[in-house]
């Protein structure tokens, strides 16, 4: 009985270890961050979460499979906040629009937008790629590899 266990456990363990190395293409990442911004008459909170296949630590391009944007226009804001576009910059000068319809956020209101991207339209995030949320008069950027916001720009 002991010999049977040794003989059966060793191949199972070896198979498990090999499967970890062979499924590196199936790895997935998730990056999220939130920050409170003050720009002109606006005070708003932005939360961005994105998921994709691959690893953020690797240097190659990574496909983004979904993007979730959650915004709150704080009650201290005196105006309606308008988002003009949500873009994924695959490199510093090349981008793909995710959403171009206006998103309007009234003071005190939470708005959540979730985008599940089909395989044909999944943008490849390069090493210097980022997510940009373009408002009416300014924009903010989210760098997924660093999990940091830049802006308002």
Image: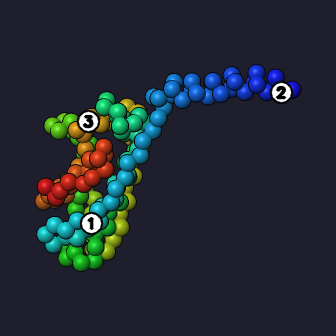
Residue wearing tag 1 = 36
Label 3 secondary element: loop
Instruction: Say if mark 2 contacts mark 1, CB within 8 Å.
Output: no
Q: Residue at x 35, y 63 (%)?
A: 111
Determine if residue 142 is in view: yes
N-terminal of the pair, mark 2 or mark 1, is 2
Q: CA distance from mark 3 to mark 1?
A: 26 Å
Local SS, label 1: strand
Q: Earlier in the sequence, mark 3 or mark 2?
A: 2
Instruction: Identify the residue shown where x is 45% and y is 38%.
Output: 28
Q: Which of the pair 138/144 is nearer the observer?
A: 144
What is the x, y in percent for residue 102?
25, 56
Residue that label 3 marks: 127
Q: Is residue 98 above or below residue 106?
A: above
Q: Which label is found at residue 2? A: 2
The total of numbered circles placed on residues is: 3
Labels 3 & 1 near each other (Cβ < 8 A) = no
Residue 6 lies left or right of residue 53; in this view the side is: right
CA separation in Å, label 2 and label 1: 61 Å
Q: Residues within 10 Å of mark 3 (few under 14, many from 20)?
A: some
């Amino acid at each position: 009985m002991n010999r049977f266990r040794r003989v059966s456990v060793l191949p199972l363990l070896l198979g498990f270890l090999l499967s970890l190395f062979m499924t590196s293409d199936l790895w997935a990442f998730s990056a999220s961050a939130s920050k409170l911004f003050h720009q002109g008459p606006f005070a708003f909170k932005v939360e961005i979460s994105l998921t994709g296949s691959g690893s953020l630590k690797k240097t190659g391009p990574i496909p983004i499979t979904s993007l979730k944007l959650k915004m709150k226009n704080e009650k201290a804001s005196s105006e309606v906040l308008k988002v003009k576009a949500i873009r994924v910059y695959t490199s510093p000068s090349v981008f793909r629009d995710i959403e171009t319809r206006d998103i309007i956020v009234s003071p005190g209101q939470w708005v959540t937008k979730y985008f599940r991207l089909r395989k044909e339209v999944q943008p490849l995030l390069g090493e210097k790629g980022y997510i940009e949320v373009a408002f009416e008069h300014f924009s903010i950027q989210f760098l997924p590899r660093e999990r940091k916001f830049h802006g308002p720009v």
